[in-house]
Image (cartoon, grey):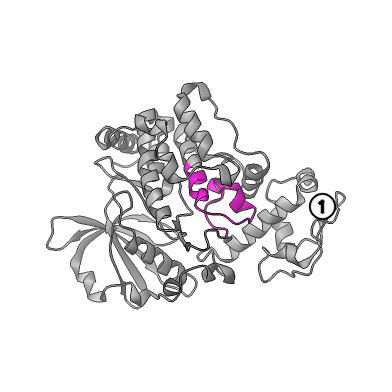
Amino acid sequence: MDVLKKRSDFCLVSAPINVEHNIHVDFNSETGFVGLPSEWETVLKSSGIDKQDVVKNGNTILSILSLNDRMQKHPEDPSAGLGHDIGSMPATEAKLELKDLVSDSNHKDFYSNLNKIGEGAAGEVFVANMNGRNEQVAIKTMTITNDNKKLLVTEINFMKSSRQENIVEFIEAFICDGNKLWVVMELMDGGCLTDVLEQYPSGVSLSEGQIAHVCLQTLKSLAYIHGCHRIHRDIKSDNILLNSKGEVKVADFGYAAQLTEQKKNRQTVVGTPYWMAPELIRGHDYGTGVDIWSLGIMLMEMLEGEPPYMEFPPLRALFLITTKGIPPLVDQGKWCPDLLDFYSKCLEKESEKRPSAAELLDHPFLSLASSAEEFAPIIDEARQAANSEPGLDL
C-alpha cells in the first residue's frame, strides 16, 4: 500500500526532510513503514504506537509524526517555517516588533521587593510591590532570543490589546539589561486550576457548581477572544489562573493566533498534545472550535483529575484521540445530565458541529455556576492540602 503518492501529500513535512522521499506501509519492516526519515523512525519506535496501528492508520500516524517534528524543531516558535501562517495575520500586526510594545526600561524602578514564586522553561515569575501603591503584581521575566522573539511579540500584543474581566490584566512590559523582558501583570494569588486538581487524591473535589463556575468564566473570555477574531490555542488547567476572591481568568497567550474576517481558518499545529482537537492533530484547517475542544478536555480534568490518555506517551495519546476518540467518563452516573450534555457538545469530533463559545454561554449547565465567593474556599482548601503533604517543609 502506497500511503503517500505525490509531492503535495508532504505539505506538512518540515523543511529538513526530503519531501521527495516515498514512504510505504510494509508490515515486514521494523516499524511498519519503509522509507521513513531516520529521526521519525526513532520517534515512532518510542511512541507506543505498534506496527498493527501503522498498517491500519498510516496517513494519521504520518500526520502525527509531522506534527511532532515541527513542535520539536520550533518549541518556542510554533509558526516557524510556515510562511502561510504569518501571512494570515493583518499587515500591521505582522510588522510589530518588541520595541513597539514595551515601556521605557526605567520603569523597572517602579517595582520592588521581588520574591520568586515560580520557574519554568519560559522564564521566572516573581511577586513584587508596585511602588507608591498598596498593591502587589506578578512579574514574568524571560530572556529574549532570536528563536522566541516573534512568539514574545505575539504574547505581549495579545495581552496588551485584550481587556476583559476574565483575562489576566496586562500592566506593562519593558526590556532590562539588553535581553531580559519583564512582563508585569495583575497578581492571581490563588495559583492555577491545576494546583486544585492535583489535590484530588488528598480529598479535595470541585462541586458541579464550582465546575460550572470555571467553565462559565473561561467561556466568557473565549467569547471575547473569538469575537476579536483570535484563537487562544492552549486552553488547559495550567493556563487558568485563580485568585483568593474566587475569580477565574485565562492567561498565557504565547500560542494565540490572529484571524482575519476573510481568513477564519489556520493550519499551524500548536498547543499541548493531550488537549489538542482532532482537526488540529490531523493538520486540517481549523478555527475557534479548537478552544472549545480544549475546554471540554479541561472539563474532563475537573471531573477526573487529568486529561485522557495521560498514561500514554504524547504521540500515542494523539493517535488515540484521532482514532479512538475520548474515552467515556469513569463514573457518568455521578454527574447531572446538563453537565454531561455540555461535555459532549464541547467534545464533538466534527468541528463544524461543535458549538461556539457564544452559543455555549446559553447552555443550561452554566446556570448551576457558583458565585466567586462560593468558589474561593476550594482554592484555600487545596493550598492547605498541599502544605500538609508529608515531607513538605512549612
Question: Residue 378 placed where, x, y %?
Answer: 31, 34
Residue at the (47%, 34%) spot, across then down: 342
Residue 252 in magenta? no
Q: In this view, does 223 lie to the left or right of 332?
A: left
Could you say which is closer to the camera, residue 120 or residue 315?
A: 315
- 254 over 332 or under it: above or below: below
Residue at the (30%, 57%) spot, across then down: 163
Q: Is residue 282 left or right of residue 90?
A: right
For mark 1, does the 10 Å Cα neighbourhood hold few (<14), some (14 to 19), or many (20 or more) residues? few
Q: In which quarter of the image is residue 244?
A: top left
Question: Residue 20 placed where, x, y %?
Answer: 78, 70
| Residue occupied by mark 1 | 30
Q: Give the range drawn in magenta.
A: 269-295
Residue 272 in magenta? yes
Secondary element under disc 1, as helix, strand or loop, is loop
Residue type at mark 1: give it: Glu
The reply to whether residue 45 is visible in this rendering is no
- 102 over 299 or under it: above or below: below
Q: In which quarter of the image is the C terminus?
A: top left
